[in-house]
Amino acid sequence: MSNKFFAFKDSRAVNICNLDSDSLEKFNFIFSELRFVTSMTIVGGVLDVEYRRRRSRINVIRCNLHTRVRLNNLLLPDLFYRPLVSTSSHLIVHCSLFGGDLDVRRVSGEFLTSLSMDNLIAVVGEFVVYTRSPDTHNIQIWTSRKPDDGPTTLNLGPEECDQTKMISGLLLVLKYQNCFKVVDIEKAKILYTIAFQNFNSEMAPYFCVNQYYYVIIGKGPFEGVSRCWFQIYHKQNYLAVFDFKDIPRSSIL
């Protein structure tokens, strides 16, 4: 599901529901390989359907949901284990489920590079964000704008990151035990760090993130109220919401 489209499959087709339409207009794509579909994602206005033709062969069918035209069919290399596949508006990356090099291709299928990685964080627009051993506390940012150049390393400090989430534009939120950091991927720069204070040391604050809001629920006050959209504080519990809607979004997403 995206902000504009919802996709689901039945035994004969991938069905699309246009969420922008008052009538929730529906249309579909029919694939002969449908029973072997392993995942579906919508990036912008493009539907990526990942399916298996043989035990170790992965294909990705791409369809434009605005023009309702099938774009291309990408055949990924043989892998003994099902690969991890991530897509953006510009890139398709894949690797073995059990690690190894990360192969990066344009959505046309053109091979660009292999990246040695420990953990894939995000594939967004023309950027791939990942960590690599032994320097797993920092992140590597590679871009297809300069495919022959190596990645840019961003030093995040000594703390271990608990969770990552892409939000609006090219912003990455990194959650730590006592703070969260917002990173501009395009500039390879930490924009700001918001610290939590005086919460129950036995339990970190609960949080959730989407492309518009970062919500924190926990105990005790925390720093960074000036960047907070609103805060509710009651009997040593708080709820804080950070609003990302006013941050300019990249046109490449």
Image: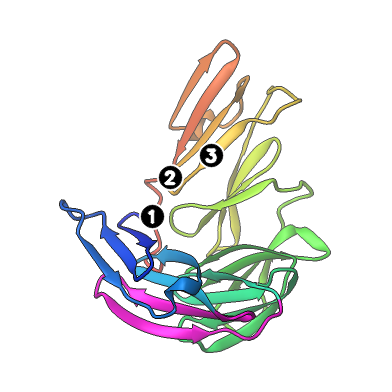
Q: Is residue 56 magenta?
A: yes
Residue at the image point whose x is 77% and y is 46% from the top = 159
| Residue toward you, 40 or 187 | 40
The residue under label 2 is 244
Q: Residues within 10 Å of mark 2 (few under 14, many from 20)?
A: some
Tell me if label 1 and label 3 are in contact, CB under 8 Å.
no
Among all residues in the image, which is located at the extreme front?
Answer: 11
Image x and y of residue 188, in percent: 60, 62
Q: Is residue 145 visible?
A: no
Q: Nearer the viewer, mark 3 or mark 2?
A: 3
In the depicted structure, whether residue 126 falls above or below residue 176: below
Query: Which disc is residue 208 wearing?
Result: 3
Q: Nearer the viewer, mark 1 or mark 3?
A: 3
Tell me the quarter of the picture where residue 70 sits: bottom left
Q: Is residue 63 magenta?
A: yes
Horizontal placement of 122 versus 41: left or right? right
Q: Residues within 10 Å of mark 1 (few under 14, many from 20)?
A: few
The residue under label 1 is 248
Tell me the quarter of the picture where residue 179 sits: top right
Going by the numbered disc 3, the residue's amino acid type is Cys
| Residue toward you, 210 or 52 | 52
Q: Alpha carbon of mark 2 to alpha carbon of mark 1: how far?
A: 9 Å
Among all residues in the image, which is located at the extreme bottom?
Answer: 110
Q: Nearer the viewer, mark 2 or mark 1?
A: 2
Q: Which residues are magenta?
A: 53-80
In the depicted structure, whether residue 97 falls above or below residue 197: below
Horizontal placement of 185 versus 9: left or right? right
Q: Earlier in the sequence, mark 1 or mark 3?
A: 3
